[in-house]
Amino acid sequence: MPFRYLSKRGESPQTDGMRLPQSLTRCFSIRVFFFIITVTVSAVMMALSAGATAKQLTGAPSALSFGNVIVGQPETEVLVLTNGGQTSITVSAMKFSTTEFSASGLSLPLTLPAGQSAALNVTFSPTRTGWTGGWIFFTSNASNSTLDVELQGTGATSYSVTASPSTVSFGQVAVGASTTQSVVLTNRVSYRVQISRLKATGGGFSVSGPALPISLNPGQSTTVTVTFVPPSAGTSGGSLFVLNQNLDVPLSGTGTTTTAAGQLSITPGAVNFGNVNVGATGSQPITMSASGANVTVSADSSSSSQFVLQGVSLPFTIAAGKSSSFNVAFKPTGSGTVSGSLSFTSNASNGSHASVPLSGRGTTTTTAGQLSITPTSVNFGDVNVGATGTEAITMSATRASVTVSSDSSSSSQFVLTGATLPFTIPAGQSVAFNVAFRPTGSGTVSGSLSFTSNAASSQTLESVTGIGTATAYTVNLSWNASPGVVGYNLYRSTTSNGAYTKMNSTVDPSTAYADSAVAAGQVYYYEATSVSSAGQESARSTPPLEVSIP
C-alpha cells in the first residue's frame, strides 16, 4: 500500500509505490481476509531534516498527532507556546493550512515575557474518513519570526480500541511531586486485537502497564497507568499513544509552586438505608470529589460498627476535577433504628475532617425477597472458536433484599463475569453483570446458569445458548515488481528476530502470495527476497512485516 508523508510546509501529501524486496524504506502491502472483513496495514513516514538552530519561540509538543478521530466527534489536544529567549516577544498572528484544524483559548496579540508559556487548545474536526495533514503558523517578533507546528490525524468511522477516560487532566500538581491516573483500554470490535506499544509524549508524562505485546478478546479490557511529574511551573500538554491501534489520548496538567489545598465534597449529603434484615447487608453508593487541587484522603472512621466503608484502600488521592465512588454498607446487629456517621481525614482546605450522616433500621421480618433475571434467556448467536461473546443480564430484588451466595454453570463455555460473590441486592434495586460465551469447538451449545440465594425461590436459572464457529484465515501479500529479476522468495517466522522459513519451494515469478496456513490469535512476520537470472538471491527485506491474526 502507498504511504504518505509531509516533506515541508506548504506541500500536499505525496504517494510513492513501494517495491519489494529492497531497503528498509521499501515496503509491501498486506491484507488479512476472513469472510468479508479486510484488515489493511499501511506505513506512514515523516520527512526528516538535519541540523537545528536556536529558536526563541517554541511549541510543545513540536508536532500534534491526533491518531484516529471519529468523524463528527472532534478531539482536542493542548499546545504550549514558550518564550525561550531573554526578552519579551509578541505573537501577532496564527493561521491554519486546513479548516479541519482549529484553536481556542489564545487571545492575540499575545505578549510572552522571557521564560513564560501560554497554552491553547488545538482541535481536529474531521469531516471525512482518511488521513489529513496540515500546519499551524504563528507569526511573532521572535528571532524565529514564524513558528510552524505540524498537525495530522485520521478521520475514522469507529475505533478498534477505545480509552476510558478519553482525555486525562491531572489538574494542578506541585513541581517535584507526582500523581497518577488509570486509563482503561477496551477492544470494541468483534475480533481479537493486539496492543504492542504504548508511548507518552509531552513534558512530565510517562506510562506504565502490563507486559507488551498483549492481545485483547472482543470486549476485553486492560488498564495502564499514566504519571505526571511536572518539570516546572506552567501548563503541560501531551498524549498517550497506543501506536499500533493509532489511538491518541490527550494529556494535560499544570505544574505549580503554590501550596493551595483542594476542596473535598461528598454526595449525597446523608445516606438512609431504610429497612435491612438483621444479619443481612444493605449498601448505598457515595461519591467523593476534589476541586481546586488534588485531595488525599488518609483515613476514615465510623461512629458505629454497623456502618462500614467498602472497596477502599487508604490512603488514596482524588485528582483535581475528578471523583471516586465507593459503597457504604449497613449490617444491623439488632432491631431498631441506628444512626451514625462516617468521617474522612484529608488535606482538603475546607476542613481536614468531612463526615456523612448515616441511618438505617434493623428488622427481623422473615419475608423473603424475590429474585428475577432479565432477559430470561440469552442467545449469543455466532461466536468464533477461541473468541469471547458477551451479553448483559440484570438481576433485580423485590419485596426484600436478596443475597446471591453462589453461581454455577452447566457448561464451562458459559461464565458469569464482573460479579464478586456473595453480593446483596437491596429491595427494589437491580444490578447488571455480563455473561460470557467462550466456545471451544464448532456447533450449537446450550446450557444454563444457576444462582443460589436467600430468595423465596432459592435457585434461579438463566438459559443460555450460542453457536461456535471456526474461521479460516488467509494472509494475502502483494508487492510491485522489481526490474531485472526472475522471481521472489517469501519467508515467515513467528518472532521478529527468530528463525525464518521459506514459504515457496521454488522461485515464484509472481508478485503475490496467499498464506492460508495461519492460526487465529497468532502473530506472523514476513520478509522477501528477489532472485536474479543468475540465481543470485538478494538480502531479505527489512524491517519484517508484522501481521496479527484475529
Image (cartoon, helix red, strand yellow):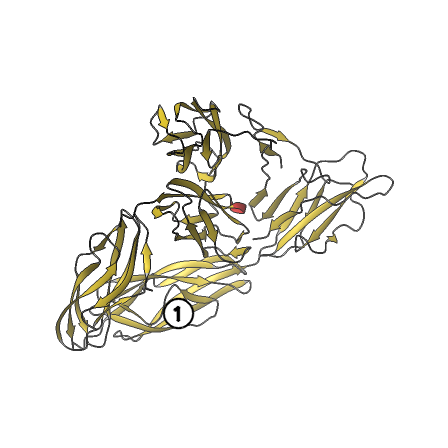
Residue 101 figure quarter:
top left
- Asked if 20 appears above or below 97 in the picture, the reply is below
Residue 378 figure quarter:
bottom left
Q: Name the residue under label 1.
A: 449
Q: Which of 239 and 300 is in front in this view?
A: 300
In the image: residue 349, left or right of residue 482: left
Tell me the crowding category of disc 1: few under 14, some 14 to 19, or many 20 or more residues within 10 angstroms, Cα based: some
In the image: residue 388, left or right of residue 462: right
Residue 130 pos. (x, y %): 51, 34
- Asked if 315 appears above or below 91 in the picture, the reply is below
Residue 103 pos. (x, y %): 38, 30
Q: Residue placed at 22% from the left, 66% from the top?
A: 427
Whether residue 432 is visible: yes
Q: Which of 227 and 335 is in front in this view?
A: 227
Whether residue 398 is visible: no
- Asked if 549 appears above or below 339 in the picture, the reply is above
In the image: residue 320, left or right of residue 466: left
Q: Residue placed at 62% from the left, 37% from the top?
A: 1
Q: Which amino acid does label 1 sit on?
A: Leu
Residue 404 figure quarter:
bottom left
